[in-house]
């Protein structure tokens, strides 16, 4: 046991030292994937080594390839770091190694999911009666939500997809905004609905679905089983679909509404931003991430469903085919997700929420938006640099030049180590994309990052 104690003590020291360095660390990695791989033997060594040696090799081999993405000056993708409370709970989760399949496999795992799930619904404005599956991320949450949707809309047209599959089934229409996230398309491939099930509603200049056009798109197609996929928080601009309008129109057509709110649903936790998700309670299912804006370690997402019995019938371990036999059963855990044996994800989410409290969550969300506005203002002040989106949330899109110049500037910034941000294609144009989603980002971090962009722009233009 003392060998384990010693190694855990080393691990704790390593983690603490790593995180203490994050505010000042260079953000990029200093080694490539190939560099790292080259340092290992090609085949598995015959003999094992003691724990302390495994630890030493692990830390030394990984360190040059680590990204300071948990730190305050990483603005790539929509990443978020992890709060100390969520980190500690996540370490405990590994130590306890619980099987969160069901109540008898781990009462604590299910209880923490119950409590954290209720708190999440309260914060996000999702009805208290909704079910919650703790999944790996928003891709999984969208897949779970659309699986429940597929089951119900086909059931409404007298088809049992659980029993009979899709062969011979009525065609399912999936109506989504032109600027939906790519995970929706992947989910449609996985579910056998296919990408050709998509019928697109045009998006406005900000990328939000043009709710005016939704009625027309729905009317123009067949009156078959229909799912409408809305979005809260466009991954480029941060724009929100008008959920109230969309739900109103969709319900009149008998459609199921799923909301992809990977990070944008967190607007519901802020009194300043809540109006963006007005009508959120009217949807049928929702996908959201914990590992993005709530700053829970990977992997953490939530699949909510307004109809727990549909959710459990679609995802449950044993098929029940909406027979009514599930009535009165207390669902939970493995009934709402893709996995049977799975990690106890409720602990880390609970700890993030307990550590921050309602006001702390609101502060994180509001502060990230304020920092995004500061970033945008600073960048706009640089000659020849333009912020192209309305910075209503935490996302900033920046024009610095043509495609080649943009690429070189992004690389220059990444190599400099002061900040890390990537590029995206928006409306046919290559732009820098900034997402401020880390709880620890300060005004000083933003100002340093603005200088890093200004310097990179200057150097590339002069080169
Ligand atoms: C990130 C994101 C997803 C996918 O979430 P993962 O956590 O990466 O699975 C889906 N939709 C939107 C809008 C996102 O921003």
Image: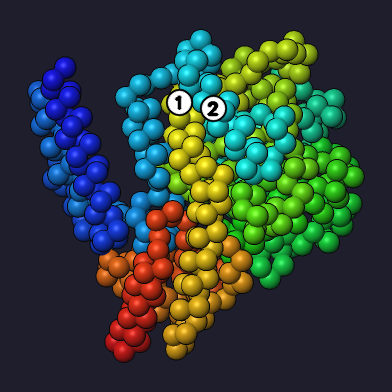
Disc on the earlier residue, 2 or 1: 2
Give the answer, above or below, for where 200 lies relative to 392: above
217 relative position to 371: left or right: right
Decide if residue 241 is in sight here: no
Q: Is mark 2 within 8 Å of ligand 1?
A: no
Q: Is residue 155 visible?
A: yes
Labels 2 and 1 touching (C-beta < 8 A): yes
**Mark sitting on residue 146:** none
Q: Residue sitting at 64 percent across and 59 percent down?
A: 272
Quadrant for residue 226, please give it. Answer: top right
**Residue 204 or 34: which is nearer the viewer?**
204
Q: Position of residue 230 (x, y in %)?
A: 71, 50
Asked if 370 appears above or below 357 in the picture, the reply is: below
Label placed on residue 113:
2
Along the viewing direction, whichever of 338 and 78 lies nearer the viewer: 78
Q: Residue at x 62, y 43 (%)?
A: 123
> Which residue is disc 1 drawn over?
344
**Quarter of the picture holding the C terminus:** bottom left
CA gap between label 2 and label 1 equals 8 Å
Give the quadrant of the N terminus: top left
Which residue is depicted at the point 16% across and 29% down? 7
**Relative image position of residue 25 (x, y in whole percent):** 25, 59
Q: Secondary structure at mark 2?
A: helix
x and y percentages locating residue 229 in the rendered image: 71, 47
């Amino acid at each position: 046991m003392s060998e384990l104690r010693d190694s855990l003590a080393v691990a704790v020291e390593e983690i603490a030292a790593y995180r203490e360095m994050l505010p000042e660390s260079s953000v990029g990695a200093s080694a490539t994937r190939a560099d790292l791989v080259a340092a290992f033997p090609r085949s598995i060594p015959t003999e094992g080594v003691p724990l302390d040696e495994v630890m030493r090799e692990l830390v030394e081999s990984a360190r040059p390839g680590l990204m300071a993405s948990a730190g305050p000056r990483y603005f790539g993708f929509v990443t978020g770091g992890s709060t100390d409370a969520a980190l500690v709970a996540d370490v405990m989760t590994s130590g306890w190694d619980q099987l969160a399949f069901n109540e008898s496999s781990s009462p604590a795992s299910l209880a923490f999911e119950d409590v954290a799930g209720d708190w999440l619904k309260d914060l996000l404005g999702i009805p208290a009666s909704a079910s919650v599956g703790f999944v790996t991320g928003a891709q999984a949450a969208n897949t779970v939500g659309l699986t429940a949707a597929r089951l119900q809309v086909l059931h409404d047209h007298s088809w049992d997809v659980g029993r009979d599959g899709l062969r011979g089934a009525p065609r399912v229409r999936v109506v989504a905004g032109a600027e939906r996230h790519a995970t929706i398309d992947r989910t449609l491939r996985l579910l056998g609905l296919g990408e050709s099930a998509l019928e697109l509603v045009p998006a406005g200049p900000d990328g939000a679905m043009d709710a005016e056009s939704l009625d027309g798109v729905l009317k123009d197609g067949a009156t078959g089983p229909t799912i409408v996929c809305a979005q809260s928080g466009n991954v480029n601009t941060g724009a929100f679909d008008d959920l109230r309008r969309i739900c109103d129109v969709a319900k009149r057509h008998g459609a199921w509404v799923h909301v992809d709110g990977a990070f944008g649903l967190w607007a519901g936790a802020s009194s300043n931003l809540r109006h963006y998700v007005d009508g959120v309670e009217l949807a049928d299912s929702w996908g959201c991430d914990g590992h993005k804006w709530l700053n829970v370690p990977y992997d953490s997402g939530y699949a909510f469903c307004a109809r727990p019995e549909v959710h459990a019938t679609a995802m449950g371990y044993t098929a029940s085919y909406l027979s009514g036999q599930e009535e009165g059963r207390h669902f939970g855990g493995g009934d709402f997700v893709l996995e049977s044996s799975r990690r106890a994800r409720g602990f880390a989410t609970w700890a993030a929420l307990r550590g921050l409290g309602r006001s702390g969550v609101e502060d994180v969300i509001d502060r990230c938006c304020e920092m995004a506005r500061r970033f945008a203002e600073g960048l706009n002040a640089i000659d020849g640099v333009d912020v192209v989106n309305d910075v209503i949330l935490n996302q900033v899109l920046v024009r610095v030049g043509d495609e080649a110049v943009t690429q070189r500037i992004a690389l220059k910034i990444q190599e400099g180590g002061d900040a890390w941000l990537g590029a995206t294609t928006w409306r046919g144009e290559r732009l820098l994309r900034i997402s401020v989603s880390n709880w620890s980002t300060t005004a000083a971090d933003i100002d340093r990052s603005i200088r890093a962009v200004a310097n990179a722009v200057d150097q590339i233009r002069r080169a």
